[in-house]
Amino acid sequence: MASAAATTAAAKSFAAPPRAPPPTSSSSFSRLLFPISKPLLFSSSSAPRSISITASSSSSSSSSTTTTTTTNTTTTPNTSPVQRTLSPTAPRKGADILVEALERAGVTDVFAYPGGASMEIHQALTRSPSITNHLLRHEQGESFAASGYARSTGRVGVCVATSGPGATNLVSALADALLDSVPLVAITGQVPRRMIGTDAFQETPIVEVTRSITKHNYLVLDVDDIPRVIKEAFFLASSGRPGPVLVDIPKDIQQQLAVPLWDPPLRLPGYLSRLPKPPARQLLDQIIRLVSESRKPVLYVGGGCSSSGDELREFVSLTGIPVTTTLMGLGNYPSDDELSLRMLGMHGTVSANYAVDKADLLLAFGVRFDDRVTGKLEAFASRAKIVHIDIDPAEIGKNKQPHVSICADVKLALEGMNELLEESGIHRKLDFTAWREELDEQKKAFPLSYKTFGDAIPPQYAIQVLDEMTRGEAIISTGVGQHQMWAAQFYNYKRPRHWLSSSGLGAMGFGLPAAAGAAVGNPGVTVVDIDGDGSFLMNIQELAMIRIENLPVKAMVLNNQHLGMVMQWEDRFYKANRAHTYLGDPANVEEIYPDLVTIAKGFNVPAARVTKKEEVRDAIKKMLETPGPYLLDVVVPHQEHVLPMIPSGGAFKDMILDGDGRTVY
């Protein structure tokens, strides 16, 4: 990138040159090829909405009136939309160039929290005719909201934060997006160029901090680079294996005047040359031959199939092969279909883990053989030939060596295999009836189940009722812990992008802001955050944004007053010794603490609490029928365990099927 000396004369007259400009622009590639199947274009799939942003939406001043003592007049924030009126050849600030570049990328919604180094961007957002800012109350909340938006829509999520603590508050969401292959563009303000490296107020080297947890990042040192950098950022975030891209923009760059040159060429020759090619026909033929020769095949489907649900269902219809999904893959194949084995892995079903253990052919599509799926690697699918299709070459053979591998878009591979099956007619000769009957016996012998103790509410029951009353059509987000696993087990996911959960990173506090982002990206769709009291408290402040925008986000908190999953491990492996996992008030263990219902009412969010099983159905009905947001506090027993469970590093033979915290181990 060019140095500060290459800026226009107008820019020079507007901002003083830096005392000691950095020698080069900074740009680093951490991981360039990423796993979801279909590359997402950097333009939005829907036409931009015409939405005016009021100046008060990004103002850091209070919305309350201010009265002077001398005149008794009242001053209120400016709420009139400020329209951009510049001609194409007129100089404009770097911040305005940035916002217009976002518009050209198809962005209609951003999640941004203002600060000193990003004020110019917020001012420019008020002049945008098509971008709405959604003001969450914490930068971690805004970045998780951008993730929920991206996961549920397939479009790139955009978040904006100021320098220093604002930028570092994005770190968890960036790491989460990298592990779960979520397309994000995070834009951060930075101190002026002349102050970089001086330990200035609110300065952090965010490019260096995030280098290993982003797909790529930029430090913009020339205002003329903004159009190209934003175009590249969206392309990188959404192509290949999607992931997060960070763009760091010093404040003086935001303030410089320049005439933008649009549609610049991409400067990514190395990345473009390494993008996967369409799958070779001979490799697809080889896979079809392996299918025809097998007797016990299983499809192992992950998050990489989120853009190829239709093709996957067609492949299953043609072949009759049973399907199990990872936590990230929930919904990519309908959970309630007769060929679905539901989720596999540590807390997967007996039938799914049995199928993988006994299979003679494992078709691994869009997965990465995560440790929570495989357990003991040597024992995982030890009888099977393995076919691995993934868009990221780094995942091929990383954990488990396949017999046949294809580095390609899963969608294209499935399309090609479906065509080959139809052309050859091989699918008519496939008959896995005996294998399916064997697995059906496992389903009947070991169904997902739970026990009831008096009038206490089994957490699984609350989720079953929610599934029944929403007919499996709601978008579900979760925090991390026991409630997350129960939501994966007992809710039926019928289509891709209806399950939003921090799977790879396991970030508590994800559920509520992710639900807010999903509600923004899917207007009119009911979004339910199934959360635990521990996770919910981590970003409870986002009730404010949900209330202000009146989003149809329902929070159903399974409240057991503990860090449930850690407590379960204490019960099983640490003789039930409680090591700081109780979240209530030790002085009054009979009282529910904190009082989430009262807190919700402080945000003007309707709320209720249920403590008996007989109250659950009516309470969920009221929650779903209440317009806008709602919080339902469901008090559940803390002794309940998530089952089945394969201990970490264990194998199928080590699966635990019964017991809870009422038993001493």
Image (cartoon, rainbow, N blue to C red):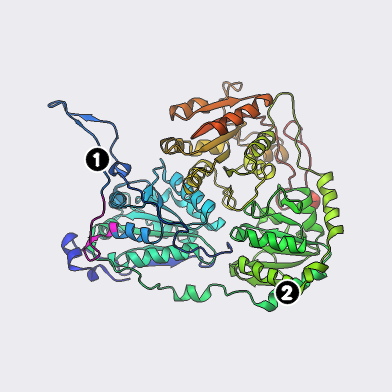
Identified at 80% across, 70% down, the residue is 292
- The x, y position of residue 653, in whole percent, is 81, 51
Name the quarter where the C terminus is drawn.
top right
Residue furthest out toward the left: 70
**Disc 1 vs disc 2: which is toward the camera?**
2
> Quick check: 432 left or right of 465?
right
Secondary structure, mark 2, is helix
Mark 1 vs 2, N-terminal side: 1
379 or 301: nearer the viewer: 301
Residue furthest out toward the bottom: 282
Indicate whether 623 appears above or below 263.
above
Identified at 53% across, 65% down, the residue is 39
Identified at 28% across, 31% down, the residue is 64
Secondary structure, mark 1, is loop
Magenta segment: 83-96
Indicate whether 80 appears above or below 236.
above
Q: Mark 2 points at which residue?
A: 423
Q: Gap between marks 1 and 2, in whole Å?
A: 65 Å
Identified at 54% across, 41% down, the residue is 526
Residue 100, by quadrant, is bottom left
Q: Mark 1 points at which residue?
A: 78
Indicate whether 338 appears above or below 460.
below
Tell me which amino acid carries mark 1. Asn
Q: Is residue 488 magenta?
A: no
- The x, y position of residue 60, in whole percent, is 30, 41
Q: Main secondary structure of the magenta part?
A: loop
Does the rendering let one see residue 31? yes
Name the quarter where the N terminus is drawn.
bottom left
Tell me which amino acid carries mark 2. Glu
Does the rendering let one see residue 594? no
Dot 1 crowding, Cα within 10 Å, few <14, some 14–19, many 20+: few
